[in-house]
Image (cartoon, grey):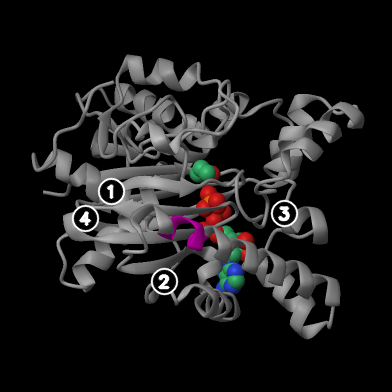
Amino acid sequence: MAEYILVINPGSTSTKVAVFDGEKELHSMNIDHPAEELKKFVDINEQLPFRKVAVMKYLESQSLKPSDLAGIAARAGAIGQLESGAYLIDETFVNACRTSQIPHPANLSPIIAYEIAEEAGTGICGYAYDAVCGCGVPDPIFTYTGVPEIKKPFFTHVLNSRAVSIEQAKKDGMKLEDTTYIVCHLGGGVTSNLIKGGKVLDFVGDDEGGFSPERSGGVPCRELVKFCFRSGLSEKQVQKKLKGQGGLTAYLGVNDARDVERMAFEEGNEEAKLVYDAMIMQLSKDIASLAPVVCGKVDKIILTGGMAYSSYLTAEMEKRVSFIAPVSVSAGTYEMEALAKGIHRVLAGEEQAQVL
Ligand SMILES: Nc1ncnc2c1ncn2[C@@H]1O[C@H](COP(=O)(O)OP(=O)(O)OP(=O)(O)O)[C@@H](O)[C@H]1O
Ligand SMILES: CCCC(=O)O
């Protein structure tokens, strides 16, 4: 009998959806939400009904009803500090998503999953897996910022970074517990993650290090403070400048690294080449900055995410960081597969879902 798992993974400009039969993907789709459509909503929470309709239409397009599903896998966002792995989406979990003070599109998917599970009326459940905040309780040494009132928040690309680490350990014939990897997730936002024994030990966040296609990365903090007071912008507007309209988007007006490469290499746009090279160099510095945490004992550096499809970018990064450890490229993301596999393990009784 089929074990249909609906997978929901909302991003800032799209909702990725898929149907798996157990561990096997039957169909997947990226539902794009154009900027004009999203502009109608004041904040991410307002997008809930709109995103749910998109997911329901997708399910229908696959000739499936909620009651046909064995479970629902949802990427979860920033709702405190969770452990890695699976969480049952119950009312407490849903409330945490609704009341989160940290806007993230993946705060919506557990709510959608919960509502669809309820509508199924068959007792099925939704589960979150490796949430953005699923790093576990960090060792205090990694949380100091120099301003006691501000602690480093532990939000990163947990899902994809852990998934590629698991795959890399398999390829290398190593036990995950014995591995130490630096995983650089090269997406619309970029994070570099030190994954030791399959867990996020430390990382350089999307607001700390190099800039990325849509995010500013770290900005000299005293200059940023001056800018905030001088600019006359609201907090929301400044946040948008840092996340969504920062990085390549701010400098070049495009958020797709392929467009930047076209500008730099086909159209001879020198500014585009300089900005792109600056980004690559800064992101390489982020990777290298994690090596001292483990005294340089790194088994592999893994480049993953959409930008890892670029052979120019990966070759440039490899040149700069391979003195630390061999570099392996795992282009694209494994988030949908990781979500489905995690929930399949829960349904098969191989992994226990945690409760908030
Ligand atoms: N062939 C390619 N060459 C260069 N860049 C690419 C290629 N394919 C995709 N990208 C880039 O990958 C980025 C998106 O990556 P990805 O899909 O991993 O991120 P996302 O899911 O949108 O965001 P995030 O991972 O931060 O949540 C875009 O900037 C896109 O330009
Ligand atoms: C930086 C946290 C991960 C994400 O942006 O989704």
Q: Secondary structure at mark 4?
A: loop
Q: In this picture, is 136 found above or below 210? A: above
Query: Where does the magenta region start and end?
Result: 287-291
Which amino acid is tagged 3? Gly
Residue 340 badge: 1
Q: Which residue is at a point 30% across and 68% down the rendered structure image?
A: 299
Can residue 61 be seen here? The reply is no
Cα distance between the residues tagged 4 and 2: 35 Å
- Pair 4/3: label in front: 3
Q: Earlier in the sequence, mark 4 or mark 2?
A: 4
Residue 324: give its label. Answer: 2
Rounded to the nearest whole Å, what is the CA distance between mark 3 and mark 1?
32 Å
Element under label 1? helix
Q: Is mark 4 within 8 Å of ligand 1?
A: no
Please tell me whether residue 331 is drawn above or below residue 134 in the rendered image: below
Label number found at residue 247:
3
**Disc 1 marks which amino acid?**
Ala
Q: Which residue is mark 4?
A: 23
x%, y% of residue 12? 59, 43
The first of marks 2 and 1 along the sequence is: 2
Q: Is residue 288 magenta?
A: yes
Q: As rendered, which of 106 and 184 lies closer to the eye? A: 184
Q: Residue at x 72, y 45 (%)?
A: 219
Q: Residue at x 81, y 61 (%)?
A: 252
Q: Nearer the viewer, residue 30 or 246?
A: 246
Q: Mark 4 is on which residue type?
A: Glu
